[in-house]
Image (cartoon, grey):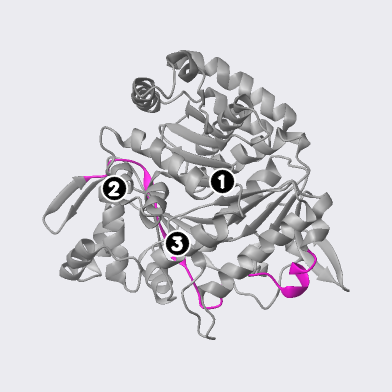
């Protein structure tokens, strides 16, 4: 299909999902929300940071590629790497000293809701999903203030031995403290000089310094956990995120095994309440391979229906599942990267025993679906294009305030670069006999083992913000899929 023809398909798909989204009774969203302190980093900020660290130490850390932020040198090194490569990254820190150092040396521009579950909850509530039940184990009074004021956004609590749904502002624990992340955004074209190196930032992106205080736990209070099946009349799907905050060992002697088990038990309780519920896990960058492997093998495999990832996350997953060569090809972004990404999607669908795997990359999406999924490939395609439209609106506006405002995403052009990448994949699949050119034209490919939906996406050339775009893509595409299950 020519790039100009996709606009008509986009309009029809958007209207189709918008008209059916009321079929979704509700969504359960957990676990991670936090407060994002956002700073757009300019040339002067980089110079100032470099003046306040040991340059030789930073140079050494750039080579070592720190997986955790323990010092200002670690932080500056990871920022240099992110800017040089133009890649988004999320790196954890377990010390509040990094927050203090950043507060002393950078003044954040603004603060807003952060964390995958928090962002998704606000987005879906603003889009008038009938009921969005959000859950955060560490809901504080300050955190609650960042949830949108909407009657359809609710938080589960137990009062007088009864499960009650309240707005987060009425459900916080006054003993809880807020969790604050730093989002360091940078722009394409910025010139950076560092220790003899000179480079131009290749694309807009950001580095997230993810706060992981000792009190963070991915769990649920026992009295609430026991009552999760009572939500059966309220939810058709669950979006779960934040598992990256699970640690190998805790001060009290517990380990990641304990928290993986708790995570699986919550999923089983959700299924007990509604056997037809669909569970989606939104993945993210997880530096610790032990945790990454445990999440995939013991939470995602067999227990989850749908998985959402970006290109870097696909490579990370393939790596720990034993497909190192394929992972390298994906992350290397060579001529055949999109072919490797497609082949990687096939591996994930089969190896993790999923019903659906959705990969979002700049300019295109690849979604593979098992043959026993009760939704047609056309409906899947419409859901993906709806998700792309919402994400384009969010990138253009910065925030989605209503379902009506998402229509503005239709004005964003389809990516030339993404369309070109799909043409590469088309030639490969046709040559290999996996698809005919006619099949590929409408973005839907049916094989004997799975169905594939491959579409070009709308890309905003100068986004107002980039944080949360991947969450918007995955969440709204998943909700679009749920709307067609009825």
Left or right placement of residue 476 versus residue 47 in this view: right
Q: Residue at x 53, y 33 (%)?
A: 450
Residue 293: mark: 3
- Are circles 3 and 1 on residues that touch, CB within 8 Å? no
Residue drawn at 66 percent across, 40 percent down: 479
| Disc nearer the start of the sequence (2/3) | 3
Q: Which residue: 60% across, 30% down?
A: 380
Residue annotated with mark 1: 354
Find disc 2 in the rendering and name its residue. Answer: 325
- Tell me where the magenta segment starts and ends, as one range: 200-227
User: Residue 355 appears at what percent x and percent y?
Assistant: 59, 42
In contact (CB < 8 Å): disc 2 and disc 3: no
Quarter of the rendering occupied by the C terminus: top right
In this view, the residue in front, 44 or 210, is 210
Query: Label 1 to label 2, Cα distance in Å?
Result: 22 Å
Label 1, secondary structure: give it.
Answer: loop
Q: Is residue 287 magenta?
A: no
199 shown above or below 263: above
Residue pictured at 53% horizontal, 18% vertical: 7
- Are discs 1 and 2 less than 8 Å apart at CB? no
Q: Secondary structure at mark 3?
A: helix
How far separated are the C-alphas under marks 3 and 1? 16 Å
Does residue 117 appear anywhere in the picture? yes
Answer with mark 3 or mark 1, whichever residue precedes in sequence: 3
Place residue 262 in its image quadrant. bottom right
Magenta segment includes 225: yes
């Amino acid at each position: 299909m020519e790039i100009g023809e996709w606009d008509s398909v986009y309009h029809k798909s958007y209207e189709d999902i918008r008209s059916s989204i009321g079929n979704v009774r509700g969504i359960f969203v957990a676990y991670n929300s936090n407060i994002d302190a956002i700073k757009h980093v300019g040339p002067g900020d980089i110079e100032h940071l470099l003046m306040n660290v040991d340059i030789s130490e930073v140079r050494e850390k750039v080579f070592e590629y720190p997986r955790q932020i323990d010092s200002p040198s670690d932080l500056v090194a990871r920022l240099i790497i992110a800017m040089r490569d133009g890649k988004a990254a999320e790196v954890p820190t377990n010390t509040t000293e990094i927050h203090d150092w950043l507060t002393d040396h950078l003044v954040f521009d603004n603060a807003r809701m952060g964390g995958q579950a928090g962002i998704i909850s606000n987005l879906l509530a603003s889009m008038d999903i009938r009921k969005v039940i959000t859950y955060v184990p560490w809901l504080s009074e300050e955190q609650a203030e960042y949830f949108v004021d909407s009657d359809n956004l609710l938080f589960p609590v137990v009062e007088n031995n009864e499960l009650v749904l309240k707005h987060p502002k009425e459900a916080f624990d006054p003993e809880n403290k807020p969790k604050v992340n730093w989002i360091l955004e940078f722009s394409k074209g910025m010139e950076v000089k560092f220790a003899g190196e000179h480079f131009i930032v290749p694309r807009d992106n950001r580095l997230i310094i993810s706060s992981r205080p000792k009190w963070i736990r991915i769990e649920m209070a026992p009295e609430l956990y026991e009552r999760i099946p009572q939500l059966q009349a309220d939810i058709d799907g669950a979006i779960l995120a934040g598992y990256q905050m699970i640690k190998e060992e805790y001060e009290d002697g517990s380990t990641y095994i304990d928290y993986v088990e708790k995570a699986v038990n919550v999923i089983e309780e959700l299924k007990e309440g509604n056997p037809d519920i669909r569970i989606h896990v939104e993945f993210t960058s997880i530096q610790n391979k032990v945790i990454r492997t445990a999440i995939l093998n013991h939470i995602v495999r067999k227990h989850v229906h749908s998985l959402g990832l970006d290109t870097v996350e696909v490579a990370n997953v393939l790596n720990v599942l034993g497909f190192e060569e394929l992972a390298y090809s994906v992350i290397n972004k060579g001529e055949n990267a999109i072919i490797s990404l497609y082949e990687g999607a096939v591996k994930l669908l089969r190896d993790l025993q999923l019903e659906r795997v959705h990969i979002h990359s700049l300019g295109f999406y690849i979604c593979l679906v098992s043959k026993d999924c009760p939704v047609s490939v056309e409906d899947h395609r419409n859901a993906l294009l709806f998700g792309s439209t919402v994400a384009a609106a969010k990138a253009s506006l910065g925030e989605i305030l209503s379902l009506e405002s998402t229509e503005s995403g239709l004005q964003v052009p389809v990516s030339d670069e993404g369309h070109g990448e799909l043409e590469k994949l088309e030639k490969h699949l046709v040559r290999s006999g996996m698809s005919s050119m006619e099949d590929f034209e409408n973005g839907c490919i049916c094989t004997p083992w799975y169905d594939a939906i491959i579409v070009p996406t709308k890309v905003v050339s100068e986004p107002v913000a980039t944080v949360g775009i991947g969450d918007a893509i995955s969440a709204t595409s998943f909700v679009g899929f749920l709307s067609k299950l009825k």
